[in-house]
Image (cartoon, grey):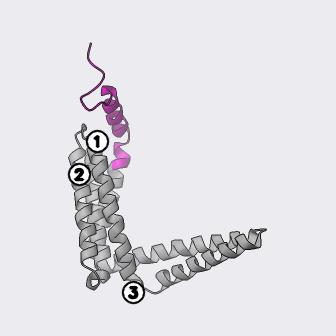
Amino acid sequence: MRDRWSEDGAEQGDEDAVLERMRDREGRLTLLGVVLLSLGFLAILFPLVATIAIKAMIGWFLLVAGAMTLWTAFQARDWSSALWAGVSAILQVVAGVYLAFFPLAGLLALTLLMGALILLQGALELVMGLRHRPGRSWPWLIFSGLCALVIGAMVLLGLPDSALYTLGLLFGINLISSGAAFIAVAKT
């Protein structure tokens, strides 16, 4: 009888089950990969537009979050809770207006934040790739993670001069590497 445990301690049937689930989701993973690739190419073609769009989207998220927090503050029965929730809401709304309606304002801070976020994504994709190593697509996850680490470092090292285009351009490259990784995973 064959041993149920592989060398790395995982059950042999786990890999087969994961591959079977991935085959069931092949179409969705491929679609996700194609969408990410398409958005990535658009971001590379129009980096300033992509940079401003990303910044405006974050601004709108803050506006909505601030409005909901302010509404919740007015519903509170305790004045001290309402006061602090109201202060938090006003800060979110002000930051949201600043990011959503002033196209070039705040790009430096947002570029710094995005660089850190891309570095974190790269580290997480490396971990996923190492955990997925028995499968055939693990090199793509490692490649995507390494690309994200390089992109994150480039974003942080290119500041402040490159804040106008770096965010959109490198985010586009990041989307392309993630899209390619999802397509590769779907085809295994």
Q: In which quarter of the view is residue 174 placed?
A: bottom left
Spatial CA distance of label 2 from label 1 is: 10 Å
Residue at label 1? 132
Q: Position of residue 138 (x, y in %)?
A: 24, 45
Q: Secondary structure at mark 2?
A: helix
Identify the magenta region: 1-29
For label 2, the crowd category at 10 Å Cα-Cα, with few meaning under 14, some 14 to 19 and many 20 or more, is many
- Residue lying at 70% horizontally and 76% vertically, measured from the top left: 83
57 to 134, vertically: above or below: below
- Residue lying at 35% horizontally and 35% vertically, measured from the top left: 18
Residue at label 3? 104
Spatial CA distance of label 1 from label 3 is: 41 Å
In the rendered structure, which disc, 2 or 3, sits on the residue that comes first in sequence? Answer: 3
Q: Is residue 180 visible?
A: yes
Dot 1 and dot 3 residues touching (CB under 8 Å) = no
Q: Is residue 41 visible?
A: no
Residue 94 lies left or right of residue 187; in this view the side is right
Residues 21 and 115: in front is 115
Residue 74 lies left or right of residue 107; in this view the side is right
The image quadrant where one finds the N terminus is top left
163 to 146, vertically: above or below: below
Dot 2 and dot 3 residues touching (CB under 8 Å) = no
Looking at the image, which residue sits at the far front?
Answer: 80
Q: Position of residue 153 (x, y in %)?
A: 25, 69
Q: How many marks?
A: 3
- Residue lying at 35% horizontally and 75% vertically, measured from the top left: 112
Residue at label 2? 142
Dot 2 and dot 1 residues touching (CB under 8 Å) = no
